Amino acid sequence: MTEAVRPETFWEQHYRTRHDGDAARPNRILTEVAATLPCGDALDLGCGLGGDTLWLARHGWQVTAVDIAGIAVERLRALARRSDLQDRVTVEQHDLARTFPTGHFDLISAHYLHTPFALDRTRVLRTAAHALRPGGHLLIVDHGSTAPWSWNQDPGAHHPTPAQIAARLCLDPGRWSVVRADMPQRRATGPGGQTATVVDNVLLIQRHEGTPDAA
């Protein structure tokens, strides 16, 4: 199916089936982590309908939000305006397989950055780690199990552990540290109201103070 469909088209169709009310629900792990950090500049990779972006902006962060789907970008811009957060939210359309937003950030969130299309996720996440300011954090939250409502129902799908993801990034331990690596369970609610127990693979990486970027 995906071979005949462009990534932008796939995700446009995906978000057309969702409604703006879904954006009111930020991801729990994002709120837990961000609430412990001083506000600064945040980057939301794969922002979707913008629940995380809007929560961060409401709590004092300056947020750059990116997504491949134009409909997600336009909806989030409209939601930011309606919420009077347009001065705190910048929304950009990016196919992360090709482009990455410019700038340096205090918090970068990559929540469920999964796709059925070719994407060098390791390269994207390494780029994100290099885009952190000294002292900044990269939060990676992946699916550790398959929810009944997921677009990916492949029974052979492999869910890398946080430790495996960290190892693939090959980050210099003298410049980045793993702050958290665990696999909590939670009760989740799908877009149709169905519920299931799911696993999140959580990896939180911090860039050390006083470590300027290098190639």
Image (tube, helix red, strand yellow):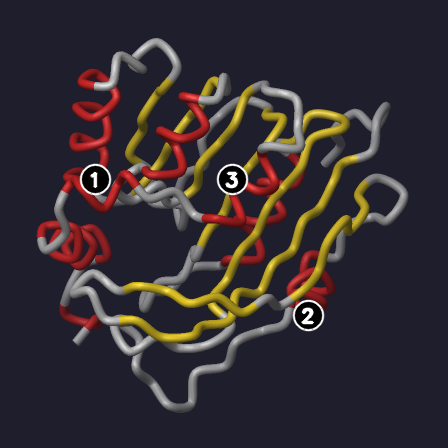
Secondary structure beneath label 1: helix
Q: Position of residue 166 (x, y in %)?
A: 70, 60
Secondary structure beneath label 3: helix
Residue sitting nearer the eye, 36 or 7? 36
The residue under label 2 is 164
Marks 3 and 1, the one that precedes in the sequence? 3
Front tag of 3 and 1: 3
- Res. 99 image quadrant: top left
| Residues at marks 3 and 1 touching, judged by CB atoms closer than 8 Å | no
Q: Label 1 is placed on what type of residue?
A: Ala
Most extreme residue toward the bottom is 155
Marks 3 and 2, the one that precedes in the sequence? 3
Horizontal side, residue 214 vs residue 129: left or right:
right
Horizontal side, residue 161 vs residue 178: left or right:
left
Question: Residue sitting at 67 percent across and 37 percent down?
Answer: 137
- Characterize the local packing of mark 1: few (<14), some (14-19) or many (20 or more) Cα atoms within 10 angstroms: many
The relative height of residue 25 versus residue 148 in the rendered view (above or below) is: above
The relative height of residue 161 versus residue 82 in the rendered view (above or below) is: below
Alpha-carbon distance for marks 3 and 2?
Answer: 24 Å
Q: Position of residue 46 (x, y in %)?
A: 37, 45
Alpha-carbon distance for marks 1 and 2?
Answer: 30 Å
Alpha-carbon distance for marks 3 and 1?
Answer: 21 Å
Question: Residue sitting at 16 percent across and 65 percent down?
Answer: 192
The residue under label 3 is 31
Q: Position of residue 203 (x, y in %)?
A: 65, 55
Question: Residue sitting at 69 percent across and 25 percent down?
Answer: 133
Residue sitting nearer the eye, 62 or 119? 62
Label number found at residue 72:
1
- Characterize the local packing of mark 2: few (<14), some (14-19) or many (20 or more) Cα atoms within 10 angstroms: few
Question: Residue sitting at 74 percent across and 40 percent down?
Answer: 206
